[in-house]
Image: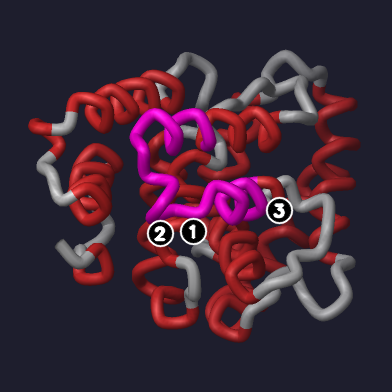
Amino acid sequence: MDIRKIKTPIGLREYWAAFSESISGKSLESHPLSFLALHHLMENYNRSGREYHNTKHIEFCLHELHSKALKYVTHLNEIIFAIIFHDSVQEINSKLNEFHSARVAYTNLDALDWKDKINPVTVHDFIMVTDHSREPKTTDEKIIVDIDLAILGQDESAYLKYEEAIRKEYSWVNDTDFKDGRIKVLQKFLDRRGGIFYTDVFQCSYEGLARRNMERAIERLQS
């Protein structure tokens, strides 16, 4: 199976089944370890409190990859695996989610015995760059960062739903602290030298609308 030919958007279960078969040559039903990996993924992403960082976010990211960036990617298997696992650990008050998610990804690669086809170091680097604390270096790193932020450039209705979901995930934070923290996050992206997005394809698709969405969000938070 050629994973490049899969039609998205598609559910994470269906996508994992196709991806697993493309790597192993086995159907999901005949690959118990892959089925178990999927079970744990779905369990993590469907946990209570995951209003945004859930299966829908991963499915959205995979669709962005296939609809906009596929032809620009060098390490396709690694970027797919990284997208699927990049939010597998999501502790709201932790600054180490990407680090722990990268460890989960490595553990699964090892258990599945896919390390000959998917480079674990590359997967680790792709996941770590989605914490948005450093500049991505390679084209693939820029692509996965842009994919992770693509929600910022969606239409107003989708963007407002995203903001509502983020607020619900941080429901334990009081309004004042949440507004202050959220403004800092949004302003950091707006202040990026060269733009919010790193690649031409995402800049052309989303830069203008993302700026408007975030500027309006800051205005609402300040009012």
Query: In the picture, residue 46 is in which quadrant?
Result: top left
Judged left or right of residue 19, residue 219 is: right
Tell me if I can see residue 52 in this picture: no
- Magenta stretch contains residue 114: yes
| Closer to us: 222 or 140 | 140
Callout 1 touching callout 2 (CB < 8 Å): yes
Which quadrant would the N terminus be assigned to in this image? Answer: bottom left
Residues at marks 2 and 3, CA–CA distance in whole angstroms: 17 Å
The amino acid type of the residue labelled 3 equals: Val
Q: Position of residue 171 (x, y in %)?
A: 68, 19
Q: Position of residue 182 (x, y in %)?
A: 81, 41
Q: Which quadrant would the C terminus be assigned to in this image?
A: top right
- Say if 115 sits above or below 197 in the image: above
**Local SS, label 1:** helix
| Distance Cα–Cα, label 1 vs label 2 | 6 Å
User: Which amino acid, mark 1?
Assistant: Ile
Question: Which of the two discs, 2 and 3, labels the residue nearer the N terminus?
Answer: 2
Write down the residue under mark 1: 79
Q: Is residue 106 visible?
A: yes
Q: What span is colored magenta in the figure?
A: 106-127
